[in-house]
Amino acid sequence: MGPVELLHMSVFSQSFSPCGRFLAAGNNYGEIAVFSLSAALSPDATALSQKPVLTFTAHEGPVFSLLSTDCHLLSAGNGEISCWSWSDLTKKNVKPLWTKRPNFKSSLEIPEINAMVLNTRDNSLVVGGGDNNIHILDLEHGIFKAVLQGHTDYDGAVRMWDSRTGQSVHCVEIYKYESCARPQYGKWISCLTTDSDWMLCGGGPSLSLWHLRSLSPTSIFPLTGCQRQTSFYQDMILAVGEGPSVAHCLLGGEVKAQIPCTPQSLNTLQLNTNSAEHRMLTVGGSSNHIDVFTNLSYRAFSLSF
Amino acid sequence: MGAVTDDEVIRKRLLIDGDGAGDDRRINVLLKSFTKWCNSPGTPEEGFTQYQRVMATLGQCEFSMGKTLMVYDMNLREMENYEKIYTNIEQNITSAHEKIAECKKEIQRAKRVRKNRQEYDALAKVIQQHPDRHETLKQLEALDKELQQLSQIKENVDAKLELRKKQFHVLLSTIQELQQTLENDEKSDNDDNNQESPAQTGE
């Protein structure tokens, strides 16, 4: 990996292992790097312990989404989903357990897979693809059992689907609400997260907190730039996006703090909740460095690809 | 290893001024002067002075021994004191640890409460934007009353219309009957006239 490639590298996705001791990160070259957190956090860590313990090429296209189940790592890139075993990866064995491709209708170009979410209730994987459809993969039988269609290209709508009937029960177009809309950025939504009755979404429109029962916006966050990933954490909201900082916001709509980071713009934010002694927040973006925050108020150190 | 520590010990003993070396010397001097006094062939005055010297040296030795014993006692008591302080500090450390854990749990609870409060505030903001329930009810009542009044008026107008319709109907049917009767009368008059004239020309 020459210096020019390192300069152009962007980290798109991250996922912590189920034991909480490893971090997997995917970049735009299709590589996945596994970092050992116990080595990086130990008191006698050197510059070498901030490098990955394992780097391998997982896909031909960028790895936009990584997801960990209780013993597997699922990665999505170039229109296919691969499954790796965490115990194999810690032993540096890089053979995938399986690779599947959802049935995309068009054969001309392969749509990318942008997001994956695990539905633990019926053991299925919900995959969002660039063909504007949501594909549901049954993990037990390994077949794609449903497709949820309804989105048009970048239509700026947030849809809520009933998984039993496969129909869209609600459709909220964020950009139509005056308080959230930012026409200069567009109407597309790039980040979405939910927490029981509340939903955070943003992108073109400003980041806003919605109450799902009444489907009404309750707070708008005055952050410049488009937010690419947000998360609820204890009583705060963490948001990353364009701009070299992690924003800490309160539910009322005020921005409490903006913590500076190394990458110029951030794509992904992950919190390690699987391990008590390696609790940390990691952010990655348009740089080959992944910033690690052990205390949310300042950057502790950086892992690098 | 043993040789080193012996050297250390010897060096320390040589370095320590005063009582240690002095005591040993004094005891040797005492023994020598005692034996000399016992074996001295000299005059009784010399013997007496030598005896006094021996007694003085003995007194000094006893004094220094008493002092060392007291120092030893003091050291033992100091050790006990330090032991007590040590256990006390250990207890304090464990209780501080427990308090820290307790406070951490407290913080988690407080954060949850704060999050809930913020959620309530956010919802309250949304609710405030909607109009008051009393006002809406009042508006509804007023509208209901208006609706009732208007339907009452409509009923009245309808009833009046029905009545007029019936009255006109009666009037028209009477007129028609009258017309019919008049026509009938005319017809029967014509018939009578026609019947009479052929009867007249027939004669």
Image: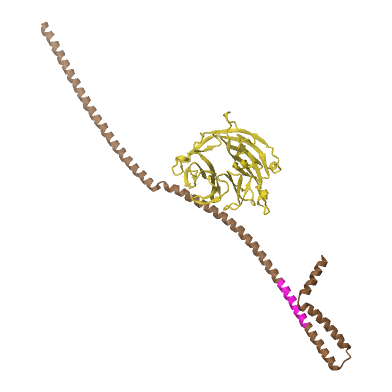
Q: Is residue B46 above or below residue B22?
A: below
Q: Position of residue A255 (x, y in %)?
A: 50, 50
The residue lying furthest to the top in this view is: B202
Q: Is residue B47 left or right of residue A214?
A: right
Q: Quadrant of the C terminus of chain A?
A: top right
Q: Position of residue B106 (x, y in %)?
A: 57, 57
Q: Which residues are magenta?
A: B62-79
Q: Is residue B165 above or below residue B28?
A: above
Q: Tell me the residue at 19%/21% (across/down).
A: B179
Q: Nearer the viewer, residue A208 or A108?
A: A108
Q: Quadrant of the N terminus of chain A?
A: top right
Q: Is residue B83 magenta?
A: no
Q: Nearer the viewer, residue B180 or A244?
A: A244
Q: Is residue A246 left or right of residue A87?
A: left
Q: In the figure, what tint was chain B given?
A: brown
Q: Is residue B107 left or right of residue B50?
A: left
Q: In the figure, what tint was chain A given?
A: yellow
